[in-house]
Image (cartoon, grey):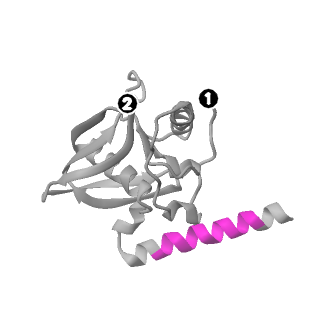
Amino acid sequence: MAIREIIKLPDKRLRLVSEPVKKIDAGIRALIDDMFETMYAAPGIGLAGIQVGVDKRVVVMDLSKKDDTQKRQVFINPEVTWASDEKSTHEEGCLSIPEYYEEVERPAEVKIKYLDLDGKSREIAAEGLFATCIQHEIDHINGVLFIDHISKLKRDRVIKKFTKAAKTAAKKVEA
Protein backbone atom coordinates (compact mmCIF):
# COMPACT_ATOMS: atom_id res chain seq x y z
CA MET A 1 0.00 0.00 0.00
CA ALA A 2 1.11 3.51 -0.73
CA ILE A 3 -0.11 7.05 -0.28
CA ARG A 4 -0.59 8.56 -3.72
CA GLU A 5 -0.51 12.21 -4.69
CA ILE A 6 -3.97 13.76 -4.89
CA ILE A 7 -4.28 15.87 -8.02
CA LYS A 8 -5.67 19.34 -7.43
CA LEU A 9 -7.57 22.01 -9.29
CA PRO A 10 -6.77 23.29 -11.96
CA ASP A 11 -5.36 19.92 -13.16
CA LYS A 12 -7.25 19.10 -16.37
CA ARG A 13 -7.36 15.38 -15.52
CA LEU A 14 -10.09 16.19 -12.99
CA ARG A 15 -12.36 16.88 -15.99
CA LEU A 16 -11.79 13.46 -17.60
CA VAL A 17 -14.62 10.95 -17.79
CA SER A 18 -13.17 7.81 -16.24
CA GLU A 19 -13.13 4.45 -18.02
CA PRO A 20 -15.21 1.53 -16.74
CA VAL A 21 -13.33 -1.22 -14.92
CA LYS A 22 -13.49 -4.31 -17.13
CA LYS A 23 -11.80 -6.74 -14.74
CA ILE A 24 -11.23 -6.61 -11.00
CA ASP A 25 -7.65 -7.81 -10.86
CA ALA A 26 -4.63 -7.36 -8.59
CA GLY A 27 -3.96 -3.92 -10.11
CA ILE A 28 -7.46 -2.66 -9.26
CA ARG A 29 -7.24 -4.14 -5.77
CA ALA A 30 -3.86 -2.43 -5.21
CA LEU A 31 -5.34 0.86 -6.48
CA ILE A 32 -8.23 0.52 -4.01
CA ASP A 33 -5.83 -0.19 -1.11
CA ASP A 34 -3.75 2.85 -2.07
CA MET A 35 -6.88 4.98 -2.40
CA PHE A 36 -7.99 4.09 1.14
CA GLU A 37 -4.53 4.82 2.54
CA THR A 38 -4.43 8.13 0.63
CA MET A 39 -7.96 9.10 1.72
CA TYR A 40 -7.30 8.34 5.41
CA ALA A 41 -3.99 10.26 5.34
CA ALA A 42 -5.55 13.35 3.70
CA PRO A 43 -7.94 13.01 5.73
CA GLY A 44 -11.18 12.58 3.79
CA ILE A 45 -14.33 10.48 3.61
CA GLY A 46 -14.39 9.70 -0.11
CA LEU A 47 -12.00 9.45 -3.04
CA ALA A 48 -12.37 8.69 -6.74
CA GLY A 49 -9.67 7.04 -8.85
CA ILE A 50 -9.20 10.13 -11.01
CA GLN A 51 -8.21 12.12 -7.92
CA VAL A 52 -5.04 10.01 -7.73
CA GLY A 53 -4.53 10.27 -11.49
CA VAL A 54 -6.12 6.93 -12.46
CA ASP A 55 -9.04 7.35 -14.85
CA LYS A 56 -10.92 4.24 -13.74
CA ARG A 57 -14.47 4.24 -12.40
CA VAL A 58 -13.48 3.36 -8.82
CA VAL A 59 -14.74 5.08 -5.67
CA VAL A 60 -13.81 4.44 -2.05
CA MET A 61 -15.62 5.87 0.96
CA ASP A 62 -15.62 5.61 4.73
CA LEU A 63 -18.24 7.66 6.57
CA SER A 64 -17.37 6.32 10.04
CA LYS A 65 -16.57 8.80 12.77
CA LYS A 66 -12.93 9.36 13.68
CA ASP A 67 -12.86 7.05 16.73
CA ASP A 68 -15.20 4.39 15.32
CA THR A 69 -14.21 1.22 13.53
CA GLN A 70 -13.48 1.85 9.85
CA LYS A 71 -16.36 1.10 7.52
CA ARG A 72 -14.69 0.81 4.13
CA GLN A 73 -16.99 0.95 1.13
CA VAL A 74 -15.87 0.26 -2.45
CA PHE A 75 -17.93 1.12 -5.53
CA ILE A 76 -16.70 -0.07 -8.92
CA ASN A 77 -18.43 1.37 -12.01
CA PRO A 78 -21.05 3.11 -9.83
CA GLU A 79 -24.00 4.87 -11.41
CA VAL A 80 -27.09 6.62 -10.11
CA THR A 81 -30.17 4.66 -11.22
CA TRP A 82 -32.75 6.83 -9.40
CA ALA A 83 -32.77 10.21 -7.68
CA SER A 84 -35.49 11.74 -5.53
CA ASP A 85 -37.18 14.98 -6.49
CA GLU A 86 -36.64 16.11 -2.92
CA LYS A 87 -33.38 18.02 -2.49
CA SER A 88 -31.04 18.46 0.44
CA THR A 89 -28.19 20.87 1.00
CA HIS A 90 -24.89 19.97 2.64
CA GLU A 91 -21.58 21.75 2.96
CA GLU A 92 -19.14 19.98 0.67
CA GLY A 93 -15.39 20.05 0.40
CA CYS A 94 -13.00 18.14 -1.82
CA LEU A 95 -9.49 16.76 -1.42
CA SER A 96 -8.76 18.08 -4.95
CA ILE A 97 -9.92 21.58 -3.95
CA PRO A 98 -8.36 21.80 -0.47
CA GLU A 99 -9.70 24.12 2.21
CA TYR A 100 -12.65 25.30 0.11
CA TYR A 101 -16.18 24.49 1.27
CA GLU A 102 -19.54 25.45 -0.14
CA GLU A 103 -23.21 24.58 0.31
CA VAL A 104 -24.35 22.26 -2.50
CA GLU A 105 -27.89 21.14 -3.28
CA ARG A 106 -28.34 17.57 -4.51
CA PRO A 107 -31.10 14.94 -4.56
CA ALA A 108 -31.84 13.91 -0.95
CA GLU A 109 -32.00 10.21 -1.85
CA VAL A 110 -30.48 8.13 -4.64
CA LYS A 111 -30.16 4.51 -5.68
CA ILE A 112 -26.77 3.37 -6.89
CA LYS A 113 -25.86 0.35 -9.01
CA TYR A 114 -22.23 -0.82 -8.79
CA LEU A 115 -19.89 -3.79 -8.64
CA ASP A 116 -18.36 -4.90 -5.35
CA LEU A 117 -14.78 -6.16 -4.91
CA ASP A 118 -15.86 -9.64 -5.99
CA GLY A 119 -17.37 -8.31 -9.22
CA LYS A 120 -20.92 -8.91 -8.00
CA SER A 121 -23.57 -6.44 -9.16
CA ARG A 122 -25.11 -4.57 -6.22
CA GLU A 123 -27.72 -1.89 -5.71
CA ILE A 124 -27.97 0.33 -2.66
CA ALA A 125 -30.19 3.20 -1.52
CA ALA A 126 -28.49 6.23 -0.03
CA GLU A 127 -29.70 9.24 1.94
CA GLY A 128 -28.15 11.95 4.10
CA LEU A 129 -24.35 12.24 4.12
CA PHE A 130 -24.06 8.91 2.26
CA ALA A 131 -26.20 10.23 -0.63
CA THR A 132 -24.24 13.48 -0.79
CA CYS A 133 -20.84 11.75 -0.70
CA ILE A 134 -21.63 9.05 -3.28
CA GLN A 135 -23.06 11.65 -5.68
CA HIS A 136 -19.95 13.82 -5.17
CA GLU A 137 -17.65 10.87 -5.96
CA ILE A 138 -19.70 9.69 -8.96
CA ASP A 139 -19.49 13.26 -10.26
CA HIS A 140 -15.68 12.94 -10.08
CA ILE A 141 -15.60 9.86 -12.31
CA ASN A 142 -17.81 11.79 -14.76
CA GLY A 143 -15.44 14.78 -14.85
CA VAL A 144 -17.70 16.97 -12.69
CA LEU A 145 -16.55 18.85 -9.58
CA PHE A 146 -18.72 20.01 -6.69
CA ILE A 147 -18.00 23.61 -7.67
CA ASP A 148 -19.99 22.94 -10.86
CA HIS A 149 -23.08 22.92 -8.61
CA ILE A 150 -22.52 26.45 -7.25
CA SER A 151 -22.97 29.86 -8.87
CA LYS A 152 -20.77 30.76 -11.82
CA LEU A 153 -19.37 33.74 -9.90
CA LYS A 154 -18.22 31.60 -6.95
CA ARG A 155 -16.94 28.85 -9.29
CA ASP A 156 -14.92 31.34 -11.37
CA ARG A 157 -13.41 32.82 -8.20
CA VAL A 158 -12.26 29.47 -6.82
CA ILE A 159 -10.86 28.34 -10.21
CA LYS A 160 -8.96 31.63 -10.52
CA LYS A 161 -7.59 31.25 -6.96
CA PHE A 162 -6.36 27.68 -7.54
CA THR A 163 -4.96 28.48 -11.01
CA LYS A 164 -2.97 31.38 -9.53
CA ALA A 165 -1.71 29.18 -6.67
CA ALA A 166 -0.63 26.47 -9.15
CA LYS A 167 1.29 29.03 -11.23
CA THR A 168 2.99 30.41 -8.14
CA ALA A 169 3.98 26.89 -7.01
CA ALA A 170 5.32 26.08 -10.50
CA LYS A 171 7.48 29.24 -10.47
CA LYS A 172 8.94 28.23 -7.09
CA VAL A 173 9.85 24.81 -8.47
CA GLU A 174 11.59 26.40 -11.47
CA ALA A 175 13.60 28.82 -9.27
Which residue appears farthest toward the left when viewing the image? 85
Q: Looking at the image, which is closer to me, 121 or 34?
A: 121
Q: Which mark is residue 65?
A: 2
Residue at horizontal 57 percent and vertical 48 percent from the top: 52
Q: Is residue 44 left or right of residue 150?
A: right
Q: Main secondary structure of the magenta part?
A: helix
The picture places residue 173, in percent across and down from the top left corner, at 80, 61
Q: Is residue 84 left or right of residue 102?
A: left
Camera-side mark, 1 or 2? 1
Residue to which mark 1 is pinned: 1
The span picked out in magenta is: 156-170
- Image quadrant holding the N terminus, namely top right
- Place residue 8 in its image quadrant: bottom right
The picture places residue 98, in percent across and down from the top left corner, at 53, 54
Residue at horizontal 52 percent and vertical 71 percent from the top: 159
Q: Are marks 1 and 2 in contact (CB under 8 Å)?
A: no
Residue at horizontal 38 percent and vertical 23 percent from the top: 68
162 in magenta: yes
SS of the residue at dot 2? Answer: loop
Question: How far is disc 1 from disc 2 in space, using C-alphas?
Answer: 23 Å
Residue type marked 1: Met
Q: Is residue 171 above or below residue 110?
A: below
Q: In this orientation, does residue 9 appear?
A: no
Q: Crowding at label 2, few (<14), some or many (≥20) Cα neighbours within 10 Å?
A: few
